[in-house]
Image (cartoon, rainbow, N blue to C red):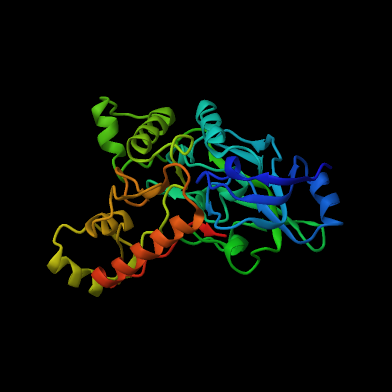
Amino acid sequence: MNIEENISLKNYNTFGIDVTAKRFICIDSVYQLQELLKVEKDIFLISGGSNMLLTKDIEKLVVHIDIKGVSIDHENENEVFLTVNAGENWHEFVLWCVDNNYGGLENLSLIPGNVGTCPIQNIGAYGVEVKDTITKVEALHIEKGKLVQFSNEECKFGYRNSIFKNEVKGKYIITSVSFKLTKQNHNFNTSYGAIETELTSKNIAKPNLKNISDAVIAIRKSKLPDPKEIGNSGSFFKNPVITKAHFLTLQKTYPEIPSYIVSENQVKVPAGWLIEKAGFKGKRFGDFGVHKKQALVLVNYNNATGKDIYNLAETIQKEIKSKFDIKLEIEVNVI
């Protein structure tokens, strides 16, 4: 195992923040990881680097998880059960599923990052959450060096949340994720967001998996910047859930405020709408700012620091709290 020193992490995080790893190693097998953990416990994990904001150099050993591989565990006429290693690129895996007519993940096309991080924040988009297809998550206990399997229920999935962000945070390294997908009688979800509009524009009345995936990709590309061109981490804030009473009060001042019913007494409000209404959409502050097409996305135009981005996030949070009495919660991990 080759441990390198003083390595820039600019190409290992989608924000493109240039911080230094004092020590760095790339791991491509579970065995390698187990051997490393026998001598190194105090580590910093990085995979696709898509859900983090780095604000400082990393003193710990940075371990890049690059374990690849997709396998079919078993299948029947209607379903296929897959296990996917943590280092597989998420979008490439989704496209592979679509090509093989495996349904369930098509709405999650073009989400940045790797498979190993998808359960941590229970990634979701366009009415679908990854928890709906995950059967189990395999993870390595850092202290004991043993592999442990978490069932779907044991993962304690919630909105952009899981046990891996809470009770067991920092105790395990996810090595693979297993999924149950459909092979026929797919449950298409086209009612959320602009999917139906996109399909209609292409005169598609009876969509297949590829049609939906293509629609999602087109929508995301029209709204979200490519991290390879403009540094970003996708949605920076969670969509807040507020009480129905609070929403009705806001609706008197802002009749056009969009919403999604969560329960009898709770309503979800798009964070992007709040940020845009507060005047931040498209605002640029030197090398960083808020994306011109999607207010939910904070961007690094060139040489911004992680602290620049974080300070902007705090400014937005304070303004949203002042204007709407809503606390915006950051979705990305701030390091």
From the viewer's perspective, is 266 left or right of 129?
A: left
Residue 192 x, y percent position in the rendering: 32, 46
Residue visible at 69% across and 44% down?
7
- Marks counted in the figure total 0
Residue visible at 64% across and 52% down?
136
- Indicate whether 333 appears above or below 215: below
Picture quarter containing residue 266?
A: bottom left
Residue 330 x, y percent position in the rendering: 44, 61
Residue visible at 37% across and 35% down?
221
From the viewer's perspective, is 35 left or right of 212?
A: right
From the viewer's perspective, is 120 left or right of 309?
A: right
- Indicate whether 107 appears above or below 131: above
Q: Judge whether residue 179 can be spotted in this image.
A: no
Residue 57 x, y percent position in the rendering: 63, 55
Identify which residue, 13 or 104, lies in the foreground. 13
Identify which residue, 286 or 241, lies in the foreground. 286
Q: Quadrant of the C terminus?
A: bottom right
Residue 32 x, y percent position in the rendering: 82, 45
Identify which residue, 170 or 121, lies in the foreground. 170
Residue visible at 39% across and 59% down?
312
Picture quarter containing residue 185?
A: top left
Q: Judge whether residue 119 can be spotted in this image.
A: yes
Q: Quadrant of the N terminus?
A: top right
